[in-house]
Amino acid sequence: MTSITNSLVKKDTTPTWKKTLQFFANNSTSVVFFVLLIAAGLLSDNFYTASNITNVLRQSVPLGLVALGMFYVILTGGIDLSVGSIMALVSVIVAMLIPSLGVPMAIVVGIISATVVGCVSGGLVAYFRIAPFIATLAMMTVARGVTMLISKGQPVFVDDMSFVNFGSGYLLGLPLPVYVFVVIGLLAHFVYKKTSFGRLVISIGSNEIATHFAGIRVERFKFAVYAISGLACGVAGIIAATRTGVGSPVLALGFELDAIAAVVVGGASLAGGRGTVVNTIIGVLILSVISNLMNLMNISGYHQQVVKGVIIILAVMLESFKSK
């Protein structure tokens, strides 16, 4: 009887090194962030100063907003390369409209414009069956080109101090843009965890065909996530413009790399169907801390790009261990 029981028990023959890698992969975001915070304190005496921490938080907001939108796109197995161009377009539109429409209406028009660009990308992907990479690459080029045309390739300065003061203002010791990010982050988390929309987006990324045969209008949800991404980019572009007081046609060049890196470092699968809002936010903080630390150590921006590329490769490699 004992021999029969033993034969039914499957012995775990997984090597220890592989178990260690799997454990690290499953908890990589939190572990990396914790280790990074310790290393940052050891490498720079200025990192944990109050002014530097608030600077890290302020710089995290535009990337965090874009990453939250990108997160929903990646959950469906898609990708959005137009995020940086949308940010630039909105910053220029808002800066140009403030003198004639005032700050509130200019912001509304800017956010609507960003959402429309996202809807175009979503329509191309969902209804015209164009690959997300191609559709959003095209929109990246179009949005940046339109930005250059309407601004004539020149920055547009904002004189309205109520707009500029928001980007540099504080409330209870925290930068005002941080509160915008917290509110939108909580909303994104609620939608992801507590609504049928969040569950169906995950289902589409996990198995789009099965979701379709279950009677779900997959196209609507794929269209919606690109609209959400566009809206998030619109808010991010406005926040970025409040920091500098300038609508810039060259704003957020290469920002799509940072947004994708943040989501992937946060543990989301590029194949879709897996990831969390909380880990995406931690991924944003990881990239922001790394950039800030390298600046404090006087390491050039070129080296920072190399580091970000390496981070994406390592994150994808860890993802492969997680899925095994």
Image: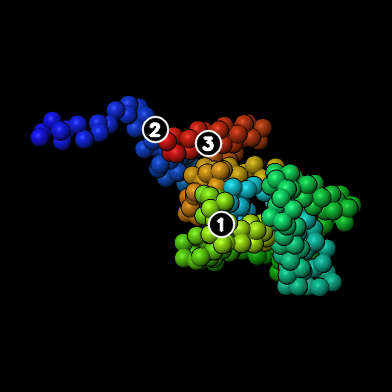
Instruction: Note whether residue 16 is visible.
Output: no
* Residue 51: % across, % down: 54, 52
User: Relative to residue 184, is residue 86 depicted above or below?
Assistant: above
- The residue tagged 3 is 316
Which mark sits nearer the N-terminus, 2 or 3?
Answer: 2
Local crowd size for mark 1, using a 10 Å CA cut-off: few (<14), some (14–19), many (≥20): few
In the structure shown, which secondary structural element does the residue marked by tag 3 occupy?
Answer: helix
* Residue 217: % across, % down: 61, 62
Answer yes or no: do the residues labelled 1 and 2 have beta carbons within 8 Å?
no
User: The disc labelled 2 sits on which kind of residue?
Assistant: Leu
Local crowd size for mark 3, using a 10 Å CA cut-off: few (<14), some (14–19), many (≥20): some
In the structure shown, which secondary structural element does the residue marked by tag 1 occupy?
Answer: helix
Q: CA distance from mark 1 to mark 2?
A: 37 Å
- The residue tagged 2 is 21
**Residue shown at 39% from the left, 35% from the top:** 22
**Residue shown at 51% from the left, 46% from the top:** 268
Which sits in the foreground, 168 or 111? Answer: 111
Which of the two discs, 1 and 2, sits closer to the camera?
A: 1
Which sits in the foreground, 151 or 280? Answer: 280
> Which mark is drawn over residue 294?
none
> Which mark is drawn over residue 213?
1
Using residue 55 as the reference point, say whether residue 87 is left or right of it.
Answer: right
User: The disc labelled 1 sits on which kind of residue?
Assistant: Phe
Q: CA distance from mark 1 to mark 3?
A: 30 Å
Which of the two discs, 1 and 3, sits closer to the camera?
A: 1
Figure colour scheme: rainbow
